[in-house]
Amino acid sequence: MLKRKSTVASRKLYSFYRSPRNWFTLLSLLIIGASCKSEDEKLPILGQREVVTKKVNGKPVTDSVYHTIPDFKFVSQYGDTVTAKNLDGKIYVADFFFTSCPTICPKMKVQLKRVYEKFKNNSQVALLSHTIDPAHDSVPVLKEFADNLGITGRQWLFVTGDKEKIYDIGQGSYMVTAQQDSSAPGGVVHSGAFILVDKEKHIRGIYDGTTEDGVDKLMSDMERLLAEYKR
């Protein structure tokens, strides 16, 4: 009796899997499940983290302190001071460039403008471009550069300041290359990366800012990060 039931069940299962319609249903469910899992997964927090032990209600509790972007003080294309506080309550994309760059910067700015257009007027999103040639890229030069790109308002800020501080925050905090090299085109070697930073000043992703694919991934992750805060 048990053998007969097993045989009947096997036949039904075989018949089920032979049906194209059932295969399509199963495939759809798998895709939906994978999609939901992907959307629910949070973006990683990049950089070194420190494990600390503190007392809570008299008991030791172990916690992780994540890498964060420290406070800074630069000057925007409008001539005013920009600090980390200006970005409170926002996710933002940071990059490093210079206006006379003959190599990757033009590609980067075309791609970053795609981000600007997609998230334009979203009060939770900002863009922050640091010049690594502050001797040349004065406030008027940055303003003209932004105007030529068609950038208005304060959502995308181009900042200048002390060269050493810009280089330090680039390499030490944003984890990208920025250094002078007389043999390089334009005299500077720098990364073409776009860095995604969350509202707590944690780095959540680093992307190739010179390619459409890299920036498509960035914009997708920005939407995921905004969705994290909604949840």
Image (spheres, rainbow, N blue to C red):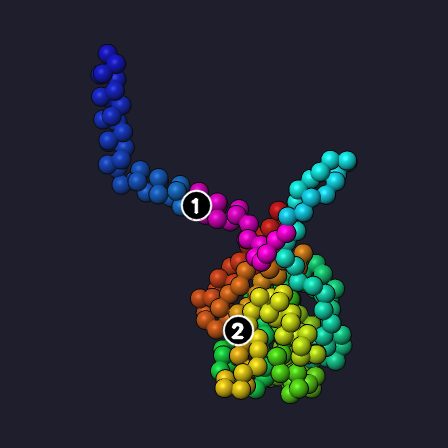
Label drawn at residue 191: 2
Give the residue pinned by disc 1. 34
Residue at the spot x=53%, y=63% of the render? 206
**Whether label 2 touches label 1, CB < 8 Å:** no
Query: Residue at coordinates 55% horizontally, 50% vertically from top-left?
Result: 42
Which sits earlier in the primary sequence, circle 2 or circle 1? 1
Answer yes or no: is residue 137 visible: yes
Three-letter residue code for mark 2? Ser
Closer-to-camera residue (209/115): 209
**Quadrant housing the N terminus:** top left
In the foreground, 131 or 8: 131
Give x and y (percent) for residue 208.
Answer: 49, 68
Residue 79 vertical position relative to residue 60 in the rendered view, above or below: below
What is the span of residues highlighted in magenta in the rendered image?
32-50
Q: How many marks?
A: 2
The three-letter amino acid code for the residue at tag 1 is: Ala
For residue 170, which quarter of the picture?
Answer: bottom right
